[in-house]
Image (cartoon, helix red, strand yellow):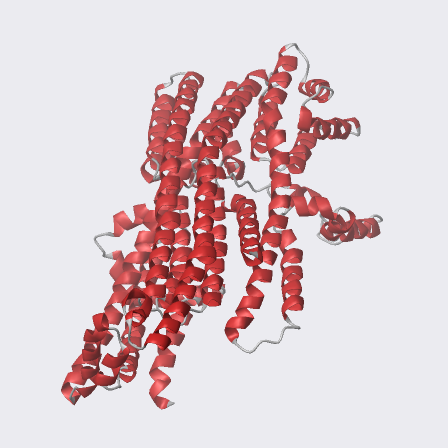
Amino acid sequence: MIAYVPLVVAVACCLGLVAPQVSSRAALFLTRLALSLFGDYVVANDRRQRERDLMRAAHVGGTHRAYASRTLLYAGVLGVAGSVIGVYVAAGVLTALDVGGDRLAERLPDALSVLAGLTRLTQLGLVELFVLLVVASATVGSALAVGTYYARWALLGQRATARAAEIDATLPRTVAFVYALSRSGMAFPRVMDALAENESVYGEAATELSVAVREMNAFGTDVLTALRHTARRTPSDDLSEFAENLASVLGTGRSLSAFLNDQYDRYQQEAESKQERYLELLSTFAEAYVTTLVAGPLFLITILVVIGLVLSDTLPLLRVIVYVAVPLATFGFAVYVDSITQGIGGTEQVDLSEAADGRGARDRVEEPTQPDGGRVTDRWQASRERLAAYDRLRSVRSWVTSPVDRILEAPRAVLVVAVPVALFWVAAVVHPLTVERPTAIVAQVDTPLVAATAVVLAAYAVVYEVQKRRIRRIESAIPDFLDRLASVNEAGTSVVGSVRRVAGTDLEALTADLERTRRDMDWGADVTTALRRLERRVASPMTSRAVVLVTNAMHASGDVAPVLRIAADEARATWTLRRERRQVMVTYLIVIYISFLVFLGVIAALSVSFIPAIEEASIAGAGTETGAGAGVGGTGVIGGLGDIDVDVYEQLFFHAAAIQAVCSGIVAGQLGEGSVRDGAKHAAVLLVFTLVAFTLMGAM
């Protein structure tokens, strides 16, 4: 056991580097250790300025000195640990090769017999063995150290690139927000403050500009300098150009509204052109997926099955393709597509929590105190405590009183119920079975497990689609709502009266929520509070942007009609782009479905026709050889046929079809609708196709 102490220490050091992810104290300890070891070196590093710019572009918290020092610490620890692990890996390889070369050559195919020469490594002398272990140690250690160092900085570069794409995607709506509030008469510094307060609604472009706002508020930097700093810091070329031009306009005294109007029109046109390029890119990805990850594996499986049945056993390689290659390749494809298309046409994520709108701060009531700091008797103390307890149980009460609404708000909650029920059903089906071989156990479990997976995915997809379609219907009515509100306000009606008038009209899916908004105002709520409650109820990104824009414009002027027109145009443009994308990508969804059905059809043909025919030929060849000795039946292709386990091949085909169904469904959701979550319904449908096809084949 003493011989394994260095290995245990090396593994413990590697695990220690993961501790900062779960413990703030561990993160602080590692940072202090790294600064004490490498702090002076990174300060004098020639690449310091470039690395600082990269950190700012990636929006990474902390100082360059701390991040660079921790990078060197990680590289050093993994380098030393990798050197130790490399020695044990080399020793393990030598132990595994400690067999006779002749014996290994007999077990290997002729094409791989050259590998038997590796057993000569066990005959090395002491000096040669020492050199081999040193080389293995240095190779593994250096690879881990260098890879860790460059990977840490490469991840920052990738994050900066992803942020640039998100900034470009959210810049049009951010410019629309700034333009609308400037048009309403609000001072520009106050416009920037409002944007920073709602950065969770307006996305990454607002987050980038909010850094300039914090620089102005915290350090007293003037607006021109802060905008120029943003232009140099941001990874987005579009935002850099916008910030530079905005600073120039503010510095020269030109019309800000005219400039923002031109920029707004420009970015709307660019959004349309980017949408076209994006759809072309998605079509390329769809064709590449069908060619490489559906037709490619199908071709390999067919060839290997023919070779395995006629010439030599290829089941191990088939299992590698089915269980390892296809899932890993699909995962890599999905990650790559997400990194390329991140922030462009994807599903919007908006924080609509109570903390986001400050309601939690408004609900807190300070205890009354005397001028000298002492407490006074509060006759409402008991009522306050009951209200606080009521608020603490609000979430539990909402789940008890309206579980369906809560599940619709959080579709992942259905998995908490569906997954245990599905596993219990699988265990109940399999438990009474008595089987002798592990392969038979798998054969009895796989069909119920695939069926349970289809049910779980279908349950999640139903809940997710109901909520998604509800939001889609509401968002389709947002442009009309804003247009009508603007028309009534232009006629001379106040904002409150305009909301009351529009709430009485037919706005399809938005009508019920607007009626509740009008009742809120009838019961004494101000229009800002009523609209904020509408935002929380709907929980839609487009609604959130409209409400934020309207409520901020009302504080600047009572004439909000121009702002409403701008908001309506922005919402209508966003909705039009989404609708065009869905229409174009339907074609490629159909292509993915057809490609999977072709995959399933070829697998069915192999199971129903080809393998039984080969099995019959094998039996006939064996009978001919028995009856005629070494006659014709003992030679040729038929003579090379051995015992064929049809059940093993059918089981492998079933697993291949099920895995391909899940993979194709995920990719279809990501390409067709912009999110992996949208692939749940496609995966469930394709799994049902698989179950039906193999059930029919079993009945034949």
Q: Does residue 368 appear in this view? A: no
Please say if 28 is above or below 93: above
Q: Quadrant of residue 694?
A: bottom right
Q: Does residue 124 appear in this view? A: yes
Residue 419 location (% of width, % of height):
62, 59
Query: Which is nearer the eye, 680 or 560?
Result: 680
Residue for point 55% across, 18% down: 565
Number of marks drawn? 0
| Figure quadrant of the C terminus | bottom right
Please say if 405 is above or below 374: above
Residue 354 location (% of width, % of height):
64, 43
| Figure quadrant of the N terminus | bottom left
Q: Quadrant of residue 73?
A: bottom left
Residue 120 location (% of width, % of height):
18, 83
Q: Residue furthest top?
A: 491
Residue for point 36% across, 27% down: 247
Residue for point 52% across, 39% down: 200
Residue 536 location (% of width, % of height):
65, 38
Q: Residue furthest front?
A: 628
Query: Which is nearer the eye, 435 or 283?
Result: 435
Question: On the picture, is 530 further left or further right than 338?
Answer: right
Query: Which is nearer the eye, 661 or 30?
Result: 661
